[in-house]
Image (tube, rainbow, N blue to C red):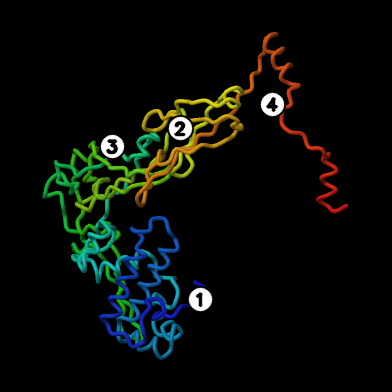
Amino acid sequence: MTTERDYYEILEISRDASEEQIKKAYRKKALQYHPDRNPGDKSAEDNFKEATEAYEVLKNPQTRQVYDQYGHAGLRQGAGAGGFGGGFAGFDIADALRAFMRDFGGFGGFEDIFGGFGGTSNRGRTVHRGRDLRVDLQLSLEEIAEGVSKKIKVNYKSTCDSCNGSGAANEEAKKTCPQCKGSGEIRQITRSLLGQMVRVAPCDYCKGDGTIITDFCPECHGSGLVDDKKTITVRIPPGVTTGNYLTMSGEGNHGPRGGPPGDVIVVVTEKEHEHFTRSGDDIVYEVPISFSQAALGTKLNVPTLAGESELNVPAGTQSGKVFKFRNKGIKHLRGLGRGDQLVRVIVWTPTKLGPEEKKLFEQLADNEKINPPRSSKSFFEKLKETLGV
């Protein structure tokens, strides 16, 4: 960050906020910007880190006092390298997640809200969430118009039954990590003018598990996961369009070592229709009519999403005229009602005429009643009038 924002401003609290108010404000910000709720959103990730940094400083009476007196400069001078220092150097997303889980891992149902994510549990061991799965689902216009339930086959990773997800061939094959002594984390203590500051990181030797495996499970080869298949039912609401997606929580890959499962993301694609094109929640149908039908008028049976409807084409209808069938379109995704069906008539011009047809059209060509009216003024005369010349 190039600009150091005020920590109180970041958490939207007053400078005399209590410890409980600081904690509550941070909880709200963390819920709003957590990476699991905003996958791929760099701005949300930065906001999450920024809020966590502010919380880490203000929740500690010592660092808060220094910040209140000297601002960011006081923290930089006092904390030294590895401190908070008003930027994100040395304070990355992993630090922010660990700090969050340290204080809120079992507080207020955060794990339920986010469906589980990599971080530090109350016991210190890293919990890895299962990967999300994407499923592309093609839907017809008829299915989109009314909504539909679909059964989807999913290939996913499930917990290995042989080792119960541990990845070990047997209990004897699981050993306590010699580096972290089973805690799953390493604590680094930095001493400064402000006192001791502790930085907690997952153990790199056991990857935060707290145990190491000396003999892998022959079924899953140590991963704790095996290939599996299942069928899930997804309810698609009416009015969706290409690119819309639904999240099936907890239906994705199981997490390693007993971690929570990921989600199945169902992404909708609209199939091209044989007769109709879509315009928002309206559907459009083009029907060709002959010159005589346009001139004399006619009645046509027109297909709709719910069957055929009769269209009355009055005499003298021009090519391109649009008629409307109300409430024959697609149900609205949000709210009541539905779109319309628009029927555009196109006067068809024959391209191959026999001698008799040519003679008939030649006779009609001189009839002023069936030819478009001609203006008495030329194009250039109209242009002069427009320009005032």
Q: Which residue is mark 1?
A: 3
Of labels 3 and 1, earlier in sequence is: 1
Q: Nearer the viewer, residue 345 or 50?
A: 345
Q: Which residue is mark 4?
A: 370
At label 4, the amino acid type is Ile
* Residue 135, image x, y percentages: 34, 40
Residue 163 sits in which quadrant? Answer: top left
Residue beneath the point at 44% across and 77% down: 86
Residue 217 sits in which quadrant? Answer: top left
Q: CA distance from mark 3 to mark 1?
A: 50 Å
Image mark for residue 67: none
For the residue labelled by badge 3, is the local secondary structure a helix, a strand or a loop? Answer: strand
Of labels 2 and 3, earlier in sequence is: 3
At label 1, the amino acid type is Thr
**Mark 4 and mark 2 residues within 8 Å of each other at the beta carbon:** no
Q: CA distance from mark 1 to mark 2?
A: 50 Å
Of labels 4 and 2, earlier in sequence is: 2
**Which residue of the protein is positioned furthest toward the top in this rendering?**
355
Q: Is residue 193 above or below residue 122?
A: below
**Which residue of the protein is positioned furthest toward the left in this rendering?**
171
Q: Which residue is mark 3?
A: 150
**Which residue of the protein is positioned furthest toward the bottom in this rendering?**
69
Q: Which residue is mark 2?
A: 272
Of labels 1 and 4, earlier in sequence is: 1
For the residue labelled by badge 4, is the local secondary structure a helix, a strand or a loop? Answer: helix
Q: Residues within 10 Å of mark 3 (few under 14, many from 20)?
A: some
At label 3, the amino acid type is Lys
At label 2, the amino acid type is Glu
Q: CA distance from mark 4 to mark 2?
A: 39 Å
